[in-house]
Image (cartoon, rainbow, N blue to C red):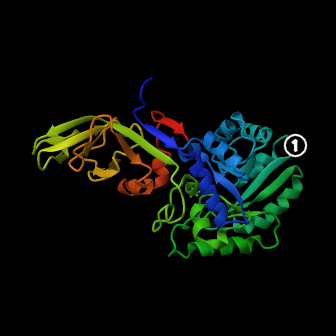
Amino acid sequence: MPIPRVTATVDLSAVRHNLSRVRALAPTSKVMAAIKADGYGHGAVPVAQALAAAGVDAFAVACLEEAVTLRDAGVTTRIALLEGVLSRDEAVEAAALGLEIVIHDRWQLELLASLPIDAPLAVWFKLDSGMHRLGFPLTEARALNEALLAHPNWQLQGWITHLACADDLTSSMTQTQIAAFETAMQGIPGERSIGNSAGLIAWPQARVDWVRPGLMLYGASPMPGQTAADLGLKPAMNVVSRLIAVHEVSAGESIGYGATFVCPVAMRVGVVAVGYADGVHRILPTGAPVLIHATRVPIIGRVSMDMITVDLRALPQAAVGDPVTLWGAGLPVEEVATWAGTLAYELLCGLTNRVHYRYL
Ligand SMILES: Cc1ncc(COP(=O)(O)O)c(C=O)c1O
């Protein structure tokens, strides 16, 4: 059997543990787990199966295709389509699969109103409390509630709004958004949903009828000042490749494309079988860490399509075949993301189909 070049090992017990952290923080809220983008790169189906077994209340995906994948795999839990449907055909299919359709814009309202469907249709309304991405203006909440009267088969699941700055404790925006949403919703029946991971971690007022965590379920921290460990979260993914060559390179010789790293002394250089075609960002600079034998060693030179090169001066015992962790236990994905000038979200969902997945 061939040995996989790069393996992402996903620990589903960590995902379940992280759900228990959500429940501890928001004990009276129902949990809609965000498993869009293939479960943030962890594999939506296994993650959904693990969370469903742990009693999660619903899932959130971005689009119909993602929900179909889950239903095809036998997932029967409630699923909301966060961006709603894009066409009448999608709406009919969503209804047939018992999916819950978020309506965020007037054109979607009209599309659903024009459907020749009498069967029950589960809908959420999304309101824009200040992020100005998706959602109806707050001033339309009352009219939306009244629109339900014209569609007796529409079953309102609740009202959603999304926070723009929940990860920033110094911003007043979250409180402003929540207050505006609550004011607009006064006297309007139906369940509310406000907080994503950062919202539910940092803002107790965002823990309403429903919370919608994503990132924290995978064991990464959404809060810049707090690590996953600080929040009691367990990282669910370990990405590991291996050394496929170890060289002695003379002082003054350069490494890799563009010859951007020049060896200051004679040194051991390792070549790791992972590159940007696997999801390791090319922007990672010289100095960004990988983990070998629990020791951080720096990447040197450019990340190429299939390989990276690392400085092995701190690890004289490193040899061909040794595992190399790109992120996971001992090297938080949040930290690697900072080196790449991005967020854990982008690294996690950026692994490519060349990576082999293994589930614990
Ligand atoms: C509408 C909505 N709710 C919840 C989430 C989950 O957010 P997070 O992964 O930050 O918890 C997202 C993710 O982007 C989202 O778009």
Q: How many marks?
A: 1
Q: Is residue 58 left or right of residue 131?
A: right
Image quarter where ligand 1 lies: bottom right
**In this rendering, position of residue 137 left or right of residue 120:** left
The residue sitting at 74% across, 71% down in the picture is 184
Relative to the observer, which residue lies in front, 153 or 228? 228
Please say if 112 is above or below 22: above
Residue 132 at x, y percent in the picture: 59, 62
Q: Nearer the viewer, residue 299 or 267?
A: 267
Label 1: which residue? 119
Residue pictured at 54% horizontal, 67% vertical: 165
Along the line of sight, the residue nearer the viewer: 66 or 299: 299
Q: Amino acid at mark 1?
A: Ala
At 52% from the left and 73% from the top, the residue drawn is 169
Nearer to the camera, 111 or 210: 210
Residue 171 location (% of width, % of height): 52, 74
Q: Quadrant of the image for the N terminus?
A: top left
Q: Is mark 1 within 8 Å of ligand 1?
A: no
Residue 10 locus on image (x, y percent)? 53, 43
Q: Quadrant of residue 330?
A: bottom left
Question: Does residue 146 appear left or right of residue 173 in this picture?
Answer: right
Residue 39: name its quadrant.
Answer: top right
> Which residue appears farthest toward the front when viewing the image?
317
Residue 204: x, y in percent? 64, 72
Residue 206 visible in this rendered orientation of the protein: yes
At numbered mark 1, what does the secondary structure look like: helix, strand or loop?
Answer: loop
From this view, report whether residue 227 is shown above or below residue 291: below
Q: Residues within 10 Å of mark 1 (few under 14, many from 20)?
A: few
Instruction: Please identify the quarter of the rendering in which residue 106 is found.
Output: bottom right
Whether residue 283 is visible: no
Compared with residue 1, is residue 139 higher up or lower down, i.e. above or below?
Answer: below
